Amino acid sequence: MSQKVDLNCDLGELPGAAGLAEELAMLPLVTSINLACGLHAGDPSRIRKLAIAAQQLGVAVGAHPSYPDREGFGRREMDLPANEVRDWVLYQIAAVAGLLKAEGIRLSHVKPHGALYNRAFRDRLVAEAIVDAMLAHDPECVLVGQAGSVLNETGQRLGLVTASEVFADRRYAADGSLLPRGTEGALISDPEKAAQTALRMVRTNAVELADGSQFGVAVDTICVHGDTPNALEIARRIGEGLKQGGVELAALPARSRLFRVRN
């Protein structure tokens, strides 16, 4: 039996009509998408358009909640109390889920964005706030968190189905977290290198850290950031490379359904 892995992309973040066209072009290349909820990027119209197009292709649709930081694109650290983090996350999940419900689409998963995602890698209180918001809205949703994170451990402990995420277009620090974007070499924009990285992670169940060592993790889903240079070609080459390596692309499974394999 071949391996299965999800290939996901953060969407709803590129500006203007040209940005939307590029994001729509990403949909046939991935199996799950994470939609910006409006607090760091995105708007209701774009959420609806991308969700409808994704459903037509059998792509799972998730929410991508952030800190309330439109100006900083959700990539600035915010020291909010845990109850405020919960409320902001619940607000965003409910908004996206409501738009999807009106179109007959069910929210598949939740993946935090930017600084909130990175904070939840190590901060138990923030992780618990995110999980609490998900449990309050729909405990059947899958939690997508970084492989080896406090967030995923917390989600599993409190009863959520979790998906362990790795990155083909980013490099890792020695502690297993992502290298900050401003760090030299933090981004991988070469499609061939990203494809090789993705296949290696799936085959070895590990990511390579900055010091050259391997950090063993589960690999359920691989992320390509929609705003990474060459994002479309990166996603295309990752998909081709995985299939050539005997790995099937399949949407994130909810608790009640199996992987849906992309032909």
Image (tube, grey):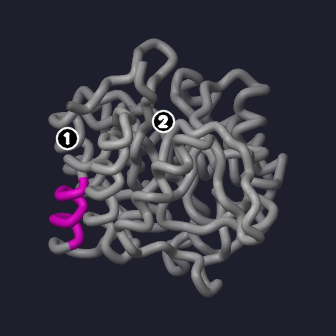
Q: Which residues are magenta?
A: 19-26
How far is the residue under mark 2 from the one under mark 1? Answer: 16 Å
- Spot occupied by residue 227 in the image (x, y as percentages of width and height): 38, 71
Circles 2, 1 touching at the beta carbon (< 8 Å)? no
Q: Residue 143, located in which quarter of the rendered image?
A: top right
Residue under numbered circle 2 = 109
Callout 1 secondary element: helix
The residue pinned by badge 1 equals: 52
Which residue appears farthest toward the top when viewing the image? 256
Of the residues shown, which amino acid type is indicated by label 2? His
- Tell me if mark 2 has few (under 14), some (14-19) or many (20+) residues whose alpha carbon lies within 10 angstroms of its own: many
Q: Quadrant of residue 100?
A: top left
Q: Is residue 153 above or below residue 43?
A: above
Determine whether, in the image, residue 163 is placed left or right of residue 127: left
Q: Quadrant of the N terminus?
A: top left
Is 8 displayed left or right of 144 in the figure? Answer: left
**Observer-nearest of 249 and 17:** 249
Q: Is residue 122 magenta?
A: no
- The amino acid pointed to by label 1 is Ile
The percent position of residue 59, horizontal first and vertical second, equals: 28, 37
Q: Position of residue 29 (x, y in %)?
A: 25, 49
* Mark 2 residue element: strand
- Which residue shows up at 16% across the image and 72% down it? 17
Residue 18 placement (x, y as % from top left): 17, 74
Q: Quadrant of residue 63?
A: top left
Task: Give the quadrant of the C terminus.
Answer: top left
Of residue 27 and residue 132, the one placed in the foreground of this image is 27
